[in-house]
Image (cartoon, helix red, strand yellow):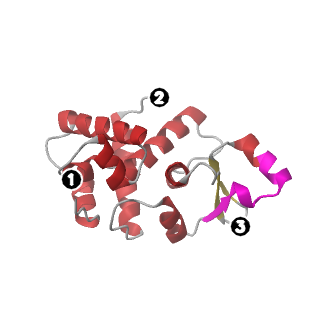
Amino acid sequence: MRLSDETYEYIKSEVIDLFIRYDVKCIPISGFELAAKMGIMLVTYSSLSERKLEKVIEVSDDGFYVEDNDGREYIFYNDTTGYKRSNMTILHEIGHAVLGHTEETDHDVAESEAGFFAAYALAPAPLIHKISDKSISNISEIFDISLEASVYALNRYHKWLCFGPGYYTVYERDLINQVIVTY
C-alpha cells in the first residue's frame, strides 16, 4: 500500500527522533538493543508452552506488539526465522508502538507504516549515501539485512536521489550527525 509523501516523511522523522532519544550511534541497527533501551520486553515464541504458542501463531507467524493494562510493553516474536528476519520483525513491531497504532487503526495502513518504519530504520537513504560501495551485497553486509531487503533499500535510495528535495532535511542532518558510518 502506498502511503502519502507526508506520512513517509513523518515516519522518517520519527525513526530519527527515536535514534536520538535512545542514543543509537552506529549501524547495523539492532531492534533487540532498541527494544531493551525502550523498556519493551521481548518474548520468543520458542519460550512459550505449546498451548500459548498455538495462540500466538494465530495472531502472527512472525511477531506482534502488545501493551498490558499496567502499561508494560511486549513484543512476541518468532525466533526460529533467523537473526535478520527477527530483527526486522522487532523493528516493525517497535514501529507499531512508536506510531501509536491501536486496534482501531486501519490494519493495512498500520502494516504499511510499520513496514516502512522498520525498513527505513535498518537502512536509511542518507546512510547508504555515506558508503562508497552501494552494491546490494555490500548494503546487505553493512546494514546486516537480507539481500532482498538490500534491493528494496537500494531502490529507496535511488528514489531519494531522484525525488528528494536536493538537500538534507533537518531530520536527515540529525541522522548523519547521530549515526556513525565508517564504510
**Residue 152, above or below 21:** above
Determine which residue is flagged by label 3: 70
Q: Which is more foreground, mark 1 or mark 2?
A: 1
**Residue 99 part of the magenta segment:** no
Q: Which element carries disc 1, helix, strand or loop? A: loop
Lower position in the chain sequence, tag 3 or tag 2: 2
Q: Which is more foreground, mark 3 or mark 1?
A: 1
In the picture, the disc for residue 131 is 1
What amino acid is labelled 3 in the image?
A: Asp
Label 2 CA crowd tier, 10 Å (few <14, some 14–19, many 20+):
few
Q: CA distance from mark 1 to mark 2?
A: 29 Å
**Residue 54 part of the magenta segment:** yes
Name the residue: 85% across, 51% down: 51
Q: Residue 150's spot in the image, x, y percent?
A: 36, 42
Q: Residue 136's spot in the image, x, y percent?
A: 30, 41
Q: Which element carries disc 2, helix, strand or loop? A: loop
Query: Residues at badges 3 and 1 in contact (C-beta under 8 Å)?
Result: no
Q: CA distance from mark 3 to mark 1?
A: 44 Å
Task: Write down the region rendered in magenta.
Answer: 41-55
Q: Residue 169's spot in the image, x, y percent?
A: 21, 50
Name the residue: 59% across, 40% down: 105
Determine which residue is flagged by label 2: 1
Lower position in the chain sequence, tag 3 or tag 1: 3
Q: CA distance from mark 3 to mark 2?
A: 34 Å
Label 3 CA crowd tier, 10 Å (few <14, some 14–19, many 20+):
few
What amino acid is labelled 1 in the image?
A: Ile
